[in-house]
Image (cartoon, helix red, strand yellow):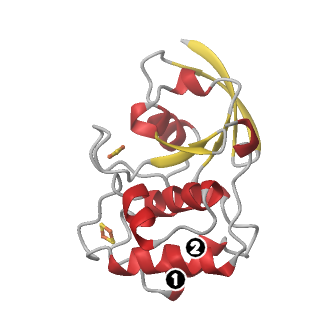
């Protein structure tokens, strides 16, 4: 076991983990952050996307020990109380989901894009989101939602982005 200290959604946790434990399993099984989901476990689908020091990573492709001393934001840390983030609002407004399984990862990836480029065009959105797969929507409303969130002009980076 290895001890790690990590700040997740604004709370600091110190835990013992196996060196082989994946970040996504640490978040879900030790912290109960089940908003982050596992779609493939092989870094193909993007469903497990979280922010590590403010930039998106596929948390099935990161070891929990690699998050030691760092800041993680999950889908559960994006809203400010009852106030959804601009990307969350836009996904709701644009009906950018059906089953919702891919949605946490999509929203985290879109938030990462808008932190880097607050005013992307459609092609840039599609490129940035290409590692996130959706079986239901055909992507059209997801792209529309990201462009709407960009147009709101209020998309912000998550905690730690200044360190990226
Ligand atoms: S579960 Fe991580 S990319 Fe699919
Ligand atoms: S909404 Fe079902 S996988 Fe995307």
Residues at marks 1 and 2 touching, judged by CB atoms closer than 8 Å: yes
Residue appearing at x 32%, y 40% in the figure: 43
Q: Residue at x 51, y 62 (%)?
A: 110
**Mark 2 neighbour density, 10 Å: few (under 14) some (14–19) many (20 or more):** many
Secondary structure found at label 1: helix
Say which residue label 2 marks: 88
Residue in the foreground of this view, choosing between 94 and 23: 94
- Tell whether 157 sits left or right of 99: right
Q: Nearer the viewer, residue 116 or 142?
A: 116
Between the C-alphas of marks 1 and 2, the distance is 6 Å
Ligand 1 picture quarter? top left
Give residue 112's position: percent from left, percent from top.
57, 54
Q: Position of residue 54 (x, y in %)?
A: 65, 45
User: Height in image: 61 above or below 106?
Assistant: above
In this view, 129 is above or below 67: below
Which residue is label 1 attached to? 92
Rendered residue at 32%/73% (across/down): 139
Q: In the picture, which quadrant includes the C terminus? A: top right
Count of picture labels: 2
Q: Residue at x 60, y 28 (%)?
A: 67
């Amino acid at each position: 076991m290895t001890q790690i200290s990590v700040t997740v959604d604004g709370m600091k946790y110190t835990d013992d983990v196996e060196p082989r434990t994946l970040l996504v399993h640490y978040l879900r099984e030790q912290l109960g952050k089940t908003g982050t989901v596992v779609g493939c476990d092989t870094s193909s689908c993007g469903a497990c996307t979280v922010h590590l020091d403010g930039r998106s990573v596929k948390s099935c492709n990161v070891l929990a020990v690699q998050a030691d001393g760092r800041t993680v934001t999950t889908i559960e840390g994006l809203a400010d109380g009852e106030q959804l983030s601009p990307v969350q609002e836009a996904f709701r407004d644009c009906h950018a989901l059906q089953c919702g399984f891919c949605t946490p990862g999509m929203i985290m990836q879109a938030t990462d894009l808008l932190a880097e480029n607050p005013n992307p065009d459609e092609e840039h959105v599609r490129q940035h989101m290409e590692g996130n797969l959706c079986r239901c929507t055909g992507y059209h409303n997801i792209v529309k939602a990201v462009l709407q969130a960009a147009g709101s002009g209020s998309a912000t980076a998550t905690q730690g982005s200044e360190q990226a």
